[in-house]
Image (tube, helix red, strand yellow):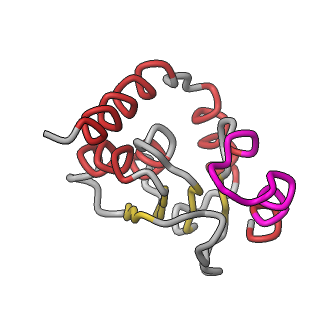
């Protein structure tokens, strides 16, 4: 088996073990519920293993998530099997079009300081802000 494949799966597993806080998810759900509109379409940029997009979909919102890390997405796909209001796909947040049919864009956690790109960091951050 390819060593790189094993390392990336291991990293995704360990990341989920370490990034398990829920206060941000609770906050997002509270803000979303104040609008009293579960028909909102929510985009989560760099959704990873689904720590945020899964609970939002479980709350009844339509969610689209994307991430460049296919190994993290595999973990997300495993959790979203029985959820009908969620879809996720693999894309690079710096170079891909995010689309425009969203009511809410979530860029949570520490994404703005952890953008993976060959591009100048400040320029990549500007792209994220512009696209959001």
- For residue 19: magenta? no
Total marks in image: 0
Where residue 75 appears, as percent x and y from the top left, is: 30, 42
Name the residue at 48% across, 19% down.
Answer: 18
Left or right: residue 80 compared with residue 41: left
Nearer to us in this view, 125 or 60: 125
Left or right: residue 123 compared with residue 81: right
* Residue at the top extreme of this rendering: 18
**Magenta-colored span:** 112-127
Vertical order, 107 against 3 (above or below): below
- Quadrant in which the N terminus is drawn: top left
Where residue 56 appears, as percent x and y from the top left, is: 48, 48
Image quadrant assignment for residue 29: top right
Name the residue at 48% across, 60% down.
Answer: 66
Image quadrant assignment for residue 8: top left
Where residue 40 appears, as percent x and y from the top left, is: 57, 67
Name the residue at 21% across, 52% down.
Answer: 82
Left or right: residue 128 compared with residue 88: right
Image quadrant assignment for residue 60: bottom left
Left or right: residue 49 compared with residue 117: left
Where residue 2 appears, as percent x and y from the top left, is: 20, 41
- Quadrant in which the C terminus is drawn: bottom right
Nearer to us in this view, 42 or 125: 125
Name the residue at 61% across, 63% down.
Answer: 93
- For residue 123: magenta? yes
């Amino acid at each position: 088996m390819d060593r790189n494949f094993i390392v990336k799966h291991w990293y995704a597993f360990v990341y989920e073990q370490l990034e398990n806080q829920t206060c941000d998810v609770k906050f997002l759900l509270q803000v979303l519920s104040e609008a009293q509109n579960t028909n909102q379409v929510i985009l989560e940029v760099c959704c990873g293993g689904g720590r945020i997009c899964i609970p939002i979909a479980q709350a009844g919102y339509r969610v689209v998530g994307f991430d460049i890390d296919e190994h993290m997405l595999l973990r997300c796909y495993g959790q979203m099997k029985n959820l009908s209001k969620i879809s996720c796909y693999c894309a690079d947040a710096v170079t891909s079009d995010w689309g425009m049919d969203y009511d809410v864009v979530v860029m949570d956690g520490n994404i703005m300081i952890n953008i993976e790109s060959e591009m100048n960091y400040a320029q990549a951050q500007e792209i994220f802000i512009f696209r959001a």
